[in-house]
Image (cartoon, rainbow, N blue to C red):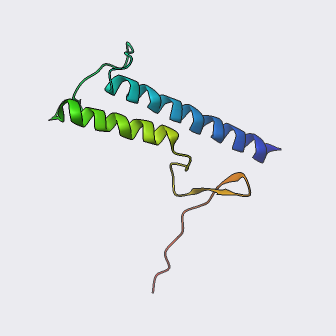
Amino acid sequence: MLRRALVVWLAFLLLAHGIAHVAGFLVNWQIASFPDLTYRTTIFGTSVDVGPDGIRLLGLCFIALSLNGRPPAPGIRRVDNLITVEPPIEKEED
């Protein structure tokens, strides 16, 4: 029962994260504007100006990440319609 609740909670978090990426696409393509997310053509704070075409490419990355069905971390994988979290693999020393 607890495992199922954790799986549902993790699926909800991944869905919410994907929806958050849609906002980045909408702003970068100037389809919508949000008070907390303004259109700008700089990345890494304000240190690199990529221009309008570069920021549209970044918007495409945002929408691709929102539509991506894979989990974001390599330690999470789908097995029999359940999401399992695996511990990191420890390397053996020779």
Q: Nearer the viewer, residue 31 or 22?
A: 31
Residue 94 place in picture, x, y as percent: 45, 87
Q: Quadrant of residue 36?
A: top left
Q: Residue at x 59, y 61 (%)?
A: 87
Residue 88 falls left or right of residue 39: right
In the rendered view, tell whether residue 56 sits above or below residue 73.
Answer: above
Residue 49 place in picture, x, y as percent: 16, 33
In the rendered view, tell whether residue 48 sits above or below residue 90.
Answer: above
Q: Nearer the viewer, residue 3 or 32?
A: 32
**Extreme residue in the right direction:** 1
Q: Nearer the viewer, residue 59 or 13?
A: 59
Residue 17 falls left or right of residue 86: left
* Residue 44 visible, this angle: no
Q: Residue at x 51, y 52 (%)?
A: 73
Residue 29 place in picture, x, y as percent: 33, 26
Residue 10 falls left or right of residue 61: right
* Residue 55 visible, this angle: yes
Which quadrant: the N terminus?
top right
Residue 17 falls left or right of residue 53: right
